[in-house]
Every structure is written in C-alpha cells, then in structure tokens.
Amino acid sequence: MTRETAPAPEERLRDADRSQHTILAAARDEFAEFGLGGARMDRIATRAGLNKRLIYYYFEDKEKLFEAVLEQAYRHIREAERALHLLDLKPADAVRRLVEFTWNYYLDHPEFLTLLNSANLHKARHLQGSQRVREMNSPLIAMLGEILERGRKEGSFRGGIDPVQLYVSIAGLAYFYLSNSFTLSSIFGRDLLSAKARSERLSHMCDVILGYVLRN
C-alpha cells in the first residue's frame, strides 16, 4: 500500500499561479461586462470554475481584485509594446508603428477600454495606490522620449515635444473614437466600425501624429 505524498513546493506554486491566472481572466471579463459596481464575486467564481473562498484567499476583496486586473491589463499592453522593438526603427517609423499598434490593440482588446472606463468612474483610486502600474508605464515614456530626441537630433522631428502629451494624444485619438463609436455612428449616420471606416481612421491618426512630430 503506497502512502500519498504532499505536492512538492514547486507544484503547489504552479497550482497557485494557475488558479490566480484563472481568477484574473474571469474577473477581467466580469469587470469588463458589468463594471466594478455591477461585478459579483459569485459570478467570477462561476466563470473561473473555482471556489469563491479561493478568490478571497488570493485577493482579499473585490476592490483588490479589480486593482490586480488593472495591473494585469497594463502589464499586457506594455509587454506587447516592448515586443515592437521600436528603438530598432527609424524615429518616424517607430512613431507610426506605435500609432498602428495602439489602434489595433484597442480593436483586439475592447475589454481594455471598458476596464479603463470603469477605473475612471472611480477616479482611478485603484491605480493611484499601485506602484507596479507606474513602474510599468515609465519605461514606455522613456522609450518614446528617446525616439523623439533621436528624431530631433537627426533633423526629422521638431523639438520640444513632451512624450507624455504625445502618448496621451495617440491613445486618445483611438480611445475616444472606439469608446464612442455607437453614438458617433448614430449622430453622423455612418458606420464608423466598418472595415473601410477603421482603415480611414488609422490613416487619419497616422497623418495627425506624424504631421505634429515631423519637421516641416
């Protein structure tokens, strides 16, 4: 008769990581669909296929879980941006690539926009206490600043561009359009999410951003 042995520490750690990953994925979908106020821990547990007590064990409460989901969302987009290797491109190509990436990322991850909407409804209090989010965003701004400075030195970019302002403009051009696409489509009588309209919007965004940074 064999004696059952306790799982090795490495196996327990892998199980914990898998459980937390599953919880975060379920919570992301719940928060994206219902917002922080409408999200329910019971539904998150059902989506994850796990006991609700396990969610409280790892994340304490719904507020902390929402903070963890936001951190994960920012981590995902920042990692995808790093994978672009923008510093290996010419400055103008790098800026264009960032605009294209941001637009396509928002299209492919509509949950990211709805999570941001929910966070802003609560005045970003879940992000204000997150050192991790600030640490994740700082390298992006530093990288964009380096691209802008390189472009200025080679004479293709004008000087005095704030990388934070530039990134906010890139994100805002995509974010506002997609977050308000239904109302804008209704107001202007055009399907702003058709393939043609999406292509036109991306072209317009690139023209606007590059028209701002390039030296005339």
Image: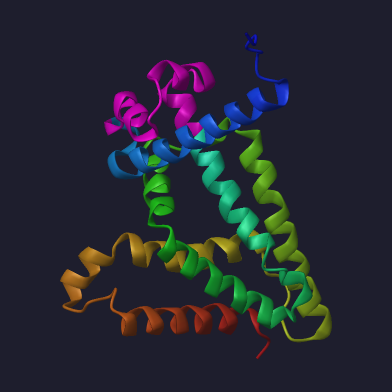
Q: Is residue 192 above or below residue 27?
A: below
Q: Is residue 18 left or right of residue 44?
A: right
Q: Which residues are magenta?
A: 38-67
Quarter of image, res 191: bottom left
Q: Residue at x 50, y 32 (%)?
A: 67
Q: Residue at x 51, y 84 (%)?
A: 207
Nearer to me, 118 or 59 = 59
Q: Residue at x 61, y 41 (%)?
A: 133
* Location of residue 43 in the rendering, given as x and y in whole percent from the top left corner: 30, 30
Q: Is residue 119 left or right of residue 71?
A: left
Is 137 within the magenta? no
Prevailing secondary structure class for the magenta stretch in the rendered image: helix
Residue furthest bottom as drawn: 216
* Location of residue 128 in the rendering, given as x and y in whole percent from the top left corner: 56, 34
Query: Is residue 125 in view from this perspective?
Result: no
Q: Residue at x 31, y 32 (%)?
A: 39
